[in-house]
Image (spheres, rainbow, N blue to C red):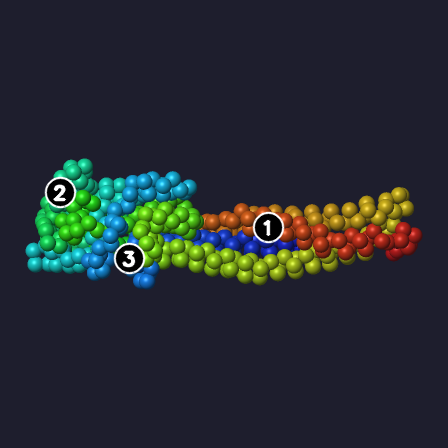
Amino acid sequence: MRSVLTMLGIIIGISSVIVIVSIIESVTNNLKDEMVGDNTNTITLSLYDKNDSWSPYDISMNGTIPGISVISDDAMEKVEAIEGVVKTTPIYSSSAIEHAYNAISSYSSVYGVREDFFEMKNLILTSGRLFIDNDYENKNNVVILSSEAEGELFKNESSLGKTIILGSDTFVVVGVVTRIKDYSDINSFGDYATKIGLETNELYIPTTSWDLIRGYDDIQSLVIKFESVDDTVMIESRASSILNKEIPGEKFEYKSGSMSENAEYLETTAQVASILLGGIASISLIVGGIGVMNIMLVSVTERTREIGLKKALGANNKVIRAQFLTEAVVLTSLGGILGVLIGIGISFIVSRVIQMPMAINAGAIAVSVVFSMLVGIIFGWIPSRKASKLDPIEALRYE
């Protein structure tokens, strides 16, 4: 019982560190998925004027740029070769183009996309069809609507086959897409925000039909899909470097807006929070270590005659010291292992409660176990040294 109570401080300290780091990492990963990767593990590199970093460069307002338009196939191949990149696709985009159906008109974001765009962005077809090769080859006036754009323009009627005015031309609606299949995918407020709350009025047309609504060769952006949002900063940096080599002069640059800054900010915040909260939780490890030292000192006192007998039979100081030091390390190490198991269990329960994937940091586990062993060595040294220094004759006389 005394040994269990001695280990309790170590167990509480280790499990606290693991649970705190797990929660921080879980929340951070969720925020990175939502804020950085748009919950689709993608970022979009757009052209920016270095003197105006608030929004991508708009030709309709600022005029064309000699030597800058489409992104070359060679550049896209180099970006796709970056470790962690799954796929890339170029797009055209405009944040506000008027479109109308009968007497109803609205302004929406319009994108000129390739057929692989929808899969990369996890856009699911709910009715109609996606673009086909014929649409690109013949520059067909066809458009795909987001479900919200369809609801605003067509109210309660189907949009398929209907004609809308987009810019100065007419387009036929061939499909409707949405971000999710059904509402059963929504399990938390975060799911709602990313899967429904962020859905806006969006229209998609083939890339080859883009000049029909703009009337000139526009500047492309590049959508990059990657395996993990943890690689966002690295991928954004390397991909931007590749695209920027194709830009004449130094006035413009490709970047992902605030996405990389968001990722860096989240990572830095998470690291600081983990260190601070983990440090606070580690105080209980120090307290547990003091408890170990206290109980070992009591043990040395209680076993004074035993120590004297062992010394009288030939045990040297090193043997006695090793015995008590081993006991202290075993207590703290066993407490560390139990603390890890309990911490993982609590993290699993918390992840279910807050409805976020559990994120166990292997580094935190390793550091916690090693730290608990060090606590045993450091706080077990004084009692073990005291035991080894006992005079055998005085120890045998001890009552």
Gap between marks 2 and 3, in whole Å? 27 Å
**Which residue was labeled with disc 3?**
56
Q: Amino acid at mark 1?
A: Val
Q: Is residue 180 left or right of residue 163?
A: right
Q: Nearer the viewer, residue 78 or 155?
A: 78
**Which residue was labeled with disc 1?**
367
- In which quadrant of the rendered image does the C terminus lie? bottom right
Residue 286 image offset from top left, x and y in percent: 65, 59
Residue 61 image offset from top left, x and y in percent: 21, 60
Residue located at (72% from left, 55% from top): 379
Q: Amino acid at mark 3?
A: Pro
Q: Is residue 208 visible?
A: yes
- Callout 2 secondary element: loop
Count of picture labels: 3
Q: Amino acid at mark 2?
A: Asn
Residue located at (24% from left, 52% from top): 66
Gap between marks 2 and 1, in whole Å? 61 Å
Residue located at (13% from left, 54% from top): 167
Q: Nearer the viewer, residue 384 or 140?
A: 140
Mark 2 or 3, which is nearer the eye?
3
Q: Nearer the viewer, residue 325 or 226?
A: 226
Residue 284 image offset from top left, x and y in percent: 62, 59
The answer to whether the residue labelled 2 contacts the one labelled 3, judged by CB atoms less than 8 Å apart, is no
Q: Considering only vertical position in the picture, is 98 above or below 337?
A: below
Q: Is residue 139 left or right of residue 196?
A: left
Q: Earlier in the sequence, mark 2 or mark 3?
A: 3
Q: Earlier in the sequence, mark 2 or mark 1?
A: 2
How many residues crowd mark 3 within 10 Å: few (<14), some (14–19), many (20+)? many
Q: Earlier in the sequence, mark 1 or mark 3?
A: 3
Q: Considering only vertical position in the picture, is 351 above or below 273?
A: above
Mark 1 or 3, which is nearer the eye?
3
**Which residue was labeled with disc 2?**
140
